[in-house]
Image: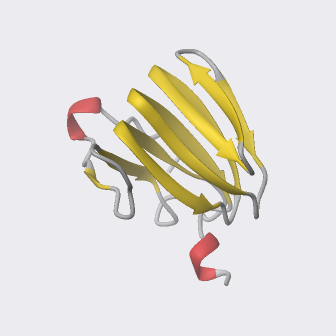
Amino acid sequence: MGVILFKKEEYLFEPLEGTEGNGSAKIARFVTDKISSSLGGGIVKMEDCKFPWTVQYDEILFVTEGEVIIDSNGEKRIGKEGDSFFIEKSTPITYETSSQGTFIFCLYPANWSKQR
């Protein structure tokens, strides 16, 4: 496979189910276990909402627009454009934004849901 280019106009954004609040979130998963058994990735766009989740993988987030808040056990960390997060596997968190935020995510392993 070598190198794959993902063009932004070809991203397929789907609603991110399970969000809370007045807004919504969309996710485009482009590096899936069909491409890589070890690494996954994509983009999330959030607007005025929260998404509680316990990560089942190690994850890196890179904030590309706006502001993204990661709440872990009541401790909120605010990332702005250009900032990054590392989230360790099995950590309960809430992704949130009070306005708008977009981030790129990378996770390992990509096939986490098949390993349960």
x, y (%) of residue 72?
A: 71, 48
Report the colour scheme.
secondary structure
Q: Nearer the viewer, residue 23 or 64?
A: 23
Using residue 35 as the reference point, say whether residue 23 is left or right of it: left
Q: Is residue 83 visible?
A: yes
The answer to whether residue 90 is above or below residue 97 is below
Image quadrant assignment for residue 16? bottom left
x, y (%) of residue 97?
A: 45, 34
Residue shown at the point (48%, 33%) measured from the top left = 103
Residue shown at the point (66%, 27%) measured from the top left = 84
Using residue 32 as the reference point, say whether residue 40 is left or right of it: right
Q: Nearer the viewer, residue 98 or 14?
A: 98
Residue shown at the point (42%, 40%) measured from the top left = 43
* Image quarter of the C terminus: bottom right
The answer to whether residue 22 is above or below residue 84 is below
x, y (%) of residue 28?
A: 35, 48
x, y (%) of residue 50?
A: 45, 48
Q: How many tags in the picture?
A: 0
The answer to whether residue 75 is above or below residue 90 is above
Q: Is residue 36 visible?
A: no
Image quadrant assignment for residue 19? bottom left
